[in-house]
């Protein structure tokens, strides 16, 4: 089999050597327009070679690379059916926009670089970490690596990672495909999700792995596929997991879908998950929608969850919404959840509100709840409040 990566690297090396010679002699040679065109062609060839050779760094792997010929689904199915001993197959596609690193699992990762992904590590899963506020990444990972594991003629796992991760294949053979169309990738991965999500309970299973991979594709076809997974005909478990990815990865388009589902999905469990998805969304209107759900959703469970996640965002608007629920929500259980939400505000910002509730609220259950959480806070203001009550 022709090793395309080696050829590409050879072309790249020759191009770089030629560029170096050019800059060495340029001050001493008069160059006409034809020579300039040749230099531009060399640079273009170098860029093309580098792009075709793009693959992550593999360790403990026997890597073989080839260009995809034909349909991706047929190529992977044929490969998997021919495998007896465990092997991996991978390719890269554009990653969804955002300053994040996707690590395929293992312990050697942190917020800026997932370091080594151990593909054969039993404790797998996917870690998605975001660039710390204020940290400037000159060039974030632009490619998503999609990996399939096959053994005894069957596919068993799907994993994803950022292109800047080092992938340890545990000594196994790795088949690397180039020139994979991202829309074909989404279409193939979707076949593992539809109709199969309920029976797949393992994070590394094909359905969960495929859903994660689709969510991380930087292609419009991924939004279309994900939207099909939240149709009312789909299982509740699939809809709940998909709305998470709308908030985590899909930006403005995902936020618009969440807003629509918050009003139309009939499952209170799905809508409760939407409140969490909104809390991790980075879109400007996410807090507004959480506040609306905290006030208007017909489910006491959903209103309570919305209050909890609003509290995580904190700020004056959050305090106002929570206090409004304590005073005006018709359900005592929601009022009690709102009291708890005050305890979730950072830096004990909710303590003054808790004291106010304990002193003035007309509902005895709500006052009792506020007193309980004040006792748990260990805040000096709470101690002062209790001393005042006990010395009356």
Image (cartoon, grey):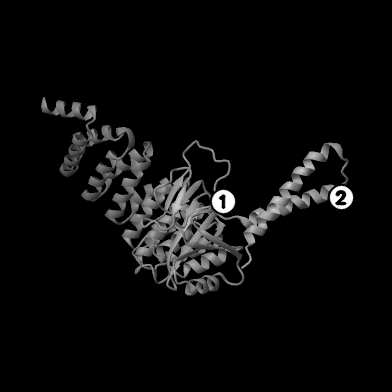
Residue on which disc 1 sits: 142
Viewport quadrant of the C terminus: top left
In percent of width and height, residue 252 lies at 51, 52
Looking at the picture, does residue 198 appear above or below residue 352? below
In percent of width and height, residue 201 lies at 33, 64
Which residue lies at the image location 79% right of the left edge and 43% below the top edge? 22
Which residue lies at the image location 24% right of the left edge and 36% below the top edge? 354
Helix, strand or loop status at disc 2: helix
Helix, strand or loop status at disc 1: loop
Viewport quadrant of the N terminus: bottom right
Which residue lies at the image location 43% right of the left edge and 46% below the top edge? 109
Residue on which disc 2 sits: 34
Q: Earlier in the sequence, mark 1 or mark 2?
A: 2
Can I make out residue 288 in this image?
no
Closest to the observer: 376 or 169?
169
| 141 lies left or right of 306 | right
Closest to the observer: 7 or 335?
7
Looking at the picture, does residue 391 appear above or below residue 254? above
């Amino acid at each position: 089999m022709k090793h395309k990566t080696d050829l590409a690297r050879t072309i790249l090396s020759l191009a770089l050597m030629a560029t170096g010679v050019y800059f060495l002699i340029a001050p001493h040679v008069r160059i006409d327009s034809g020579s300039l065109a040749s230099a531009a062609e060399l640079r273009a060839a170098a860029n093309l070679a580098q792009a075709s050779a793009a693959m992550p760094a593999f360790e403990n792997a026997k890597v073989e690379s080839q260009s995809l010929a034909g349909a991706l689904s047929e190529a992977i199915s044929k490969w998997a059916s021919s495998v007896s001993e465990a092997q991996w197959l991978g390719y890269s596609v554009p990653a969804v926009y955002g300053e994040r690193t996707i690590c395929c699992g293992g312990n050697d990762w942190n917020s800026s670089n997932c370091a080594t992904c151990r593909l054969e590590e039993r404790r797998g899963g996917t870690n998605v970490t975001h660039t710390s506020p204020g940290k400037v990444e000159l060039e974030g990972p632009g490619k998503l690596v999609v990996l399939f594991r096959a053994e005894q003629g069957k596919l068993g796992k799907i994993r994803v990672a950022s292109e800047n991760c080092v992938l340890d294949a545990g000594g196994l053979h790795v088949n690397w495909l180039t020139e994979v169309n991202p829309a074909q990738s989404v279409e193939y991965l979707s076949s593992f999700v539809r109709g199969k999500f309920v029976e797949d309970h393992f994070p590394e299973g094909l359905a969960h792995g495929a859903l994660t991979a689709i969510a991380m594709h930087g292609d419009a076809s991924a939004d279309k596929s994900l939207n099909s997974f939240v149709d009312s005909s789909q299982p509740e478990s699939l809809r709940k997991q998909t709305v998470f990815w709308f908030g985590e990865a899909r930006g403005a388009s995902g936020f618009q879908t969440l807003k629509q589902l918050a009003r139309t999905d009939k499952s209170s469990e799905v809508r409760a998950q939407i409140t969490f998805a909104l809390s991790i969304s980075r879109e400007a209107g996410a807090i507004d929608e959480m506040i609306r759900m905290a006030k208007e959703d017909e489910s006491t469970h959903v209103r309570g969850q919305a209050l909890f996640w609003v509290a995580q965002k904190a700020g004056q608007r959050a305090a106002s919404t929570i206090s409004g629920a304590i005073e005006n929500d018709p359900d005592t259980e929601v009022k009690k959840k709102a009291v708890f939400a005050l305890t979730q505000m950072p830096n004990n910002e909710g303590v003054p509100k808790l004291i106010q509730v304990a002193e003035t609220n007309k509902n005895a259950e709500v006052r009792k709840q506020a007193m309980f959480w004040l006792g748990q806070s260990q805040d000096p203001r709470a101690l002062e409040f209790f001393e005042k009550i006990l010395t009356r």
